[in-house]
Image (cartoon, rainbow, N blue to C red):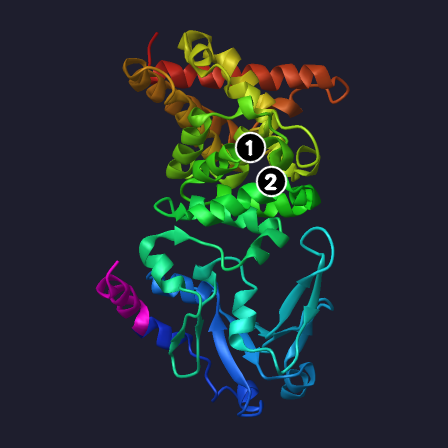
Amino acid sequence: MGSEGLGSLEHKGQGLLALLAPDRSDPYLAGLNPSIAIYCVGGAVRDTLMGDQEVDRDYLVVGARPEDLLQAGFKPVGKDFPVFLHPDSKNEYALARTERKTGAGYRGFEIHADPSVRLEDDLCRRDLSINAMAVDEQGRLHDPYGGLEDLQRKKLRHISSAFREDPVRLLRLARFLSRWPEFQVSTDTLALCEAMRDDGELQALVAERVWQELYKGLDEKAPGRMIGFLRTLGLLEPVLGLAQQQVDAGLETRLNRASTLGLPAEVKAALLLAEAKGGLRNKLPKKVEEWIALLPGFSALERLLEAPTAWPEKLTAWASRADVFRRPERLGAMALLGQLLLADQGQETNLKLYERWGLWISLCDELSRLSVSAVAQSQSADDPSAIREAIEGYRQSFVHKRLAESTIND
């Protein structure tokens, strides 16, 4: 690749890079000794070079001790890492540090932070080259590990063999594939991932961290790429609790379509993990479990939508099982989920089914807003079953009336 292409990417983000430069006129930064260097680092630099204008900024402080930031008014965060919060902006300012592997998992590291740690030393401990760039106080780019070139080539490449010491990094790599569908994993990095799979380090992953990375990846534009990467590496079972045969290219495509439709990540998680076993399956958030419980109601939409004359009973029963009357806020995602699953039907059938599904959801929405208090009050308070039957009959009559007014037919 010629330097012209690299230069164009740098030029594209150069004006915005200047906006990342730490501002010494800030009263808290002004309180630091001028010999202390401050850099904007990590994802903010990467995303700005890619053209994003709204980025979360993290800063690196080189040549400082914890007491320097405390005396300047910064607030310490936690006990494990030398990280401080700016009192006003709440941005993170971390002391330059190195890490040494001392045990299993992402917590098995010994942290070393003192004024002797250089910018290059801190950047070297990061996972990928594209995350190891920095912008100094003059707005200049520092790129000791070739992150700019990898951005231009759309490559995800590890910086050093230390990548394999933290199994969460493999999940972050998979997540980045879902965020940037046009990026590819470098050959060397793929080989390192295979070595991580084989050396047992992934056994140190905890369900909470797996879920955090999985959820972020499912919320990106192409979540199927993340799942496909894990499937290719044979990691579906050890990481997600899914047997290899439970996931294929069809499910990966469906997850990508779900993102295109705008389905929330918890619904995509339900589609993916409904059959999962093991640690992650036992640690899923309640909202994902709720969607997993709803999925059987979408398993045969074509049969559900046939014969609109039978809808008054079928639709009200379905809405009740789906808890639509208490949770009407779900209806938007339910409508999208139905569209996604109907896309698996034949194209000729689709138009009719889509029309019927649209009316079905619209009627559910109307039912969720239909007041039934007068009907309930007309029944004896001592007979709950009679109240339920009266409300059910009222709702069925409402659906029958609305169907008579529609143009839908058998």
Q: Amino acid at mark 2?
A: Arg
**Amino acid type indicated by mark 1:** Gly
Q: For the residues labelled 1 and 2, say whether their Cβ atoms are less than 8 Å apart.
A: yes
Most prominent secondary structure in the magenta stretch?
Answer: helix
Q: Position of residue 384 (x, y in %)?
A: 73, 19
* Residue occupying image coordinates x 55% and y 78%: 118
| Mark found first going from the N terminus, 1 or 2 | 2
- Within-10-Å neighbours for mark 1: few <14, some 14–19, many 20+: some
**Where the C terminus falls, by quadrant?**
top left
Q: Which one is nearer the viewer's eye here, 7 or 286?
A: 7
Which residue was labeled with disc 2? 197
User: Against 313, is 57 above or below?
Assistant: below
- Is disc 2 placed on a helix, strand or loop? helix
Q: Residue at x 69, y 41 (%)?
A: 203
| Residue found 33% across the figure and 21% down from its top | 355
Q: Residue at 42% across / 67% down in the picture?
A: 45
From the viewer's perspective, tell me whether residue 154 is left or right of residue 289.
Answer: left
* Residue range corresponding to the magenta coloring: 1-14
In the rendered image, residue 2 lying in the magenta stretch gets the answer yes
Marks 1 and 2 sit apart, C-alpha to C-alpha, by 8 Å
Q: Position of residue 138 (x, y in %)?
A: 39, 83
Please tell me in which quadrant of the rendered image residue 72 appears: bottom right
- Out of 137 and 161, give the one closest to the viewer: 161
Image coordinates of residue 194 in percent, x first then y, are 55, 41
Q: Which residue is mark 1?
A: 234
